[in-house]
């Protein structure tokens, strides 16, 4: 029984950590210097603006989308932190209730799904405002923020040399 609980705990912590990593990457892309009530752009947005040579209209649209996205993401952060606190409290119990752990994880997953869905919607909104050459530069920045190498060849995943799919360059 303890091995089963330990396995669930490890799985839960893995999900929580991966989600936290995703949130950190998102915030690095659209990083703000401080949380100002005006929604002023931060360093991440300034980099996007500079490297993509945004027109004034594009900049205006992206700032509006950014503000709306941050509003939703911020509204999810408090309940998400509370659920994580409940999860840790239950894990600390002498005999944690597996059903309760699963319920908490499901609520965490739902909140994270909402956040990730909003981030994807936001990235699609950004993509629609950009010209094709700007889109390529933008997604290069996104890939860098995810810590992924960007290969020279278009349309290829950046597979590690030992893990390349069979039949692709560098597998033999």
Image (cartoon, grey):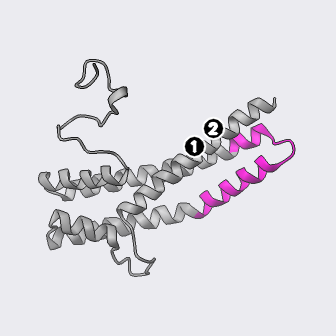
Instruction: Determine whether 73 is above or below 91 in the image.
Output: below
Give percent across and percent down for residue 10.
Answer: 66, 39
Instruction: Determine whether 54 is above or below 161 in the image.
Output: below
Tell me which corner region of the image, top left, top right, bottom left or bottom right, holds residue 39.
bottom left
Instruction: Determine whether 47 is above or below 97 in the image.
Output: below
Labels 2 and 1 touching (C-beta < 8 A): yes
Q: Quadrant of the C terminus?
A: top left
Q: Label 2 belongs to which residue?
A: 11
The residue furthest right is 94
37 vs 55, left or right, is right
Give percent across and percent down for residue 92.
Answer: 80, 50
* Residue in the foreground of this view, choosing between 87 and 170: 170
Extent of the magenta region? 78-103
Q: Label 1 belongs to which residue?
A: 15
Q: Examine the structure image and report whether residue 85 is included in the region drawn in magenta.
A: yes
Residue positioned 63% across, 48% down in the render: 107
7 vs 160, left or right, is right
* Residue in the foreground of this view, choosing between 56 and 25: 25
Q: Secondary structure at mark 2?
A: helix
Q: Badge 1: few (under 14), some or many (20 or more) residues near its Cα, within 10 Å? A: some
Residue positioned 29% across, 52% down in the render: 124
124 vs 115, left or right, is left
Q: Quadrant of the N terminus?
A: top right
Q: CA distance from mark 2 to mark 1?
A: 6 Å
Residue positioned 46% across, 58% down in the render: 24
Q: Secondary structure at mark 1?
A: helix
Give percent across and percent down for residue 44.
Answer: 33, 67
Tell me which corner region of the image, top left, top right, bottom left or bottom right, holds residue 98.
top right
Give percent across and percent down for residue 13.
Answer: 63, 45
Instruction: Determine whether 31 is above or below 114 in the image.
Output: below
């Amino acid at each position: 029984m303890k091995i089963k609980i330990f396995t669930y705990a490890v799985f839960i912590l893995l999900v929580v950590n991966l989600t936290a990593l995703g949130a950190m990457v998102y915030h690095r892309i659209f990083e703000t210097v401080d949380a100002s009530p005006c929604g002023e752009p931060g360093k991440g947005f300034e980099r996007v603006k500079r490297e993509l040579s945004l027109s004034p209209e594009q900049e205006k649209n992206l700032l509006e989308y950014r503000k709306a996205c941050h509003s939703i993401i911020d509204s999810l952060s408090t309940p998400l932190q509370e659920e994580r606190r409940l999860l840790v409290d239950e894990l600390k119990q002498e005999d944690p209730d597996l059903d309760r752990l699963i319920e908490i994880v499901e609520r965490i997953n739902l909140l994270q799904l909402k956040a990730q869905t909003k981030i994807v919607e936001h990235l699609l909104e950004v993509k629609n405002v950009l010209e094709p050459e700007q889109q390529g530069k933008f997604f290069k920045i996104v890939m860098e923020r995810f810590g992924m190498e960007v290969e020279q060849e278009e349309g290829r995943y950046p597979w590690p040399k030992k893990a390349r799919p069979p039949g692709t360059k560098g597998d033999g």
